[in-house]
Amino acid sequence: MEEARQLVDVGQDAFGREAQLAEDAAVAWAAMRRGAEREGVRLLLLSGFRSIEGQAEIVQKKLSAGQPLEAILRVSAYPGFREHHTGRAIDLGSPTCAHFSEAFGATREFDWLSQRAPQFGFTLSYPRGNPQGVVFEPWHWCLWEKAGREP
Ligand SMILES: [Zn+2]
């Protein structure tokens, strides 16, 4: 999937940074967040669009800190292959647990997402035992490619 070109603002993320998503993902995220709120579930947006350059910087920083490349790629997929550059991936959190932690997989927010996110078009990209060999990421959800859509 290519880097997103058309991005729209979706407000601040949980860290107070202005977040952006591709337009269809922004619409789907807004609908999903409202749907969750109506059922008393508060989803926090941790990150949306990240440029390929930004992801490359993350890998470079970890390499500089002495982490072996193989270990880095298990948790930070190679730049450009981690879906955030498409503007269609979102990282979500709960007010009740540490951000980007496996503990998110045991929250009611995650339970809600597991049941309802597909109705809004989002799917969990890296479930336990995923074939890509990426660590379990309960927080990372990506809008499906629509059938017939050019990648
Ligand atoms: Zn993510």
Image (spheres, rainbow, N blue to C red):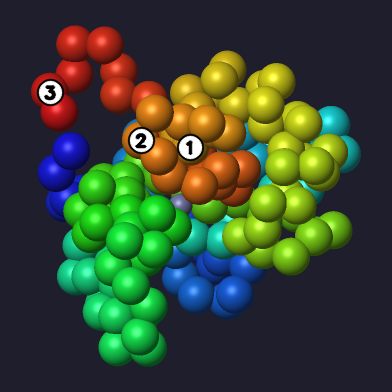
Q: Residue at x 30, y 24 (%)?
A: 145
Q: Which residue is mark 1?
A: 126
In-front residue for pair 103/54: 103
Query: Label 2 neighbourhood size at 10 Å, few (<14), some (14-19), many (20+)?
Result: few
Q: Secondary structure at mark 3?
A: loop
Q: Is residue 119 above or below residue 70?
A: above
Is the distance from the Cβ of mark 3 to the nearest ligand 1 atom less than 8 Å? no
Badge 3 is on which residue?
150
Residue type, numbered disc 1: Tyr
Residue 122 visible from this viewpoint: no
Answer with left or right where residue 28 lies relative to residue 49. Answer: right
- Place residue 54 in its image quadrant: bottom left
Please say if 139 is above or below 28: below
Which one is earlier in the sequence, the residue at label 3 or at label 1? Answer: 1
Which amino acid is tagged 3?
Glu
Q: Position of residue 26 (x, y in %)?
A: 43, 43
**Disc 2 to disc 1: CB gap under 8 Å:** yes
> Label 3 vs label 1: CA separation?
23 Å
